[in-house]
Image (cartoon, rainbow, N blue to C red):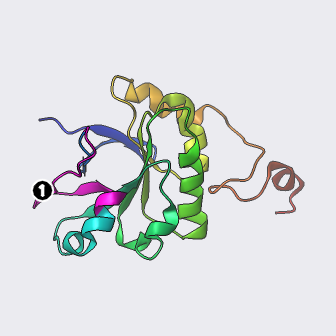
Amino acid sequence: MALRRLIKQRSIVEDGWTLLRPADDGALPAVPAEGAVIVPLALWQQERETLLARSAPLGVWLGPADEPASIAEDVQRFPVIAVDFPVFTDGRGYSIARLLRQRYGYKGELRAIGDVIRAQLFYLQRCGFDAFAVREGRDIEDALKGLNDFSEAYQVSVERPVPLFRRRAGTA
């Protein structure tokens, strides 16, 4: 089976992580004994101690209704935190990313998963995402270009905390 590709740090790379999702009936997935996995928040909360005992890398993913505060004490344990966008029109993941980066000081890989499309990448990056699992069936090379759709932004962001008018005036 070929590894899935994703955009990470503005490059297309092979994804060495396995994303675990609940079954259609809501049952939590089984965690393989080996290999890097990204587990849903509910599984992390239910099996925290067992998951911490694994020797393989562990990440967690949050859905749009999940509170980043629920992993605040553990945030630095995860080399990867993913945020799910079940539909691209659901913008709650942008707020989750900003909270993880700004309030909880998360420094690891912050990955957008789910219905992630080119039109979002520039804005997702501004909120702190640095990895993007583009929706299956979309051209990942084209999506990568979305990070450069705009050369400048007026508003402050995780990546650029000084607004444009201050940068231009040299009063940063």
Whole-percent x, y for residue 134 in the image: 40, 34
Viewer-nearest residue: 6 or 113: 113
Residue found 51% across the figure and 60% down from its top: 67
Q: Residues within 10 Å of mark 1 (few under 14, many from 20)?
A: few
Viewer-nearest residue: 65 or 74: 65
Is 22 situated left or right of 34 in this image? Answer: right
Residue found 23% across the figure and 56% down from its top: 37
The answer to whether residue 106 shows anywhere in this view is no
Residue found 61% across the figure and 31% down from its top: 149
In this figure, which residue is indicated by the disc labeled 1? 32
User: Which residue lies most toward the front here?
Assistant: 25
Quadrant of res 56:
bottom left
Q: Main secondary structure of the magenta part?
A: loop
Looking at the picture, does residue 151 appear above or below residue 53? above
Is 33 situated left or right of 67 in this image? Answer: left
Disc 1 marks a residue whose amino acid type is: Pro
Point out the stretch of residues depicted in magenta: 24-43
Residue found 54% across the figure and 70% down from its top: 104
Whole-percent x, y for residue 145 in the image: 51, 30
Quadrant of res 75:
bottom left
Whole-percent x, y for residue 102 in the image: 60, 65
Q: Is residue 35 magenta?
A: yes
Looking at the picture, does residue 119 appear above or below residue 84? above
Helix, strand or loop at mark 1: loop
Looking at the picture, does residue 1 appear above or below residue 70? above
Looking at the picture, does residue 139 appear above or below residue 24? above
Q: Quadrant of the C terminus?
A: bottom right
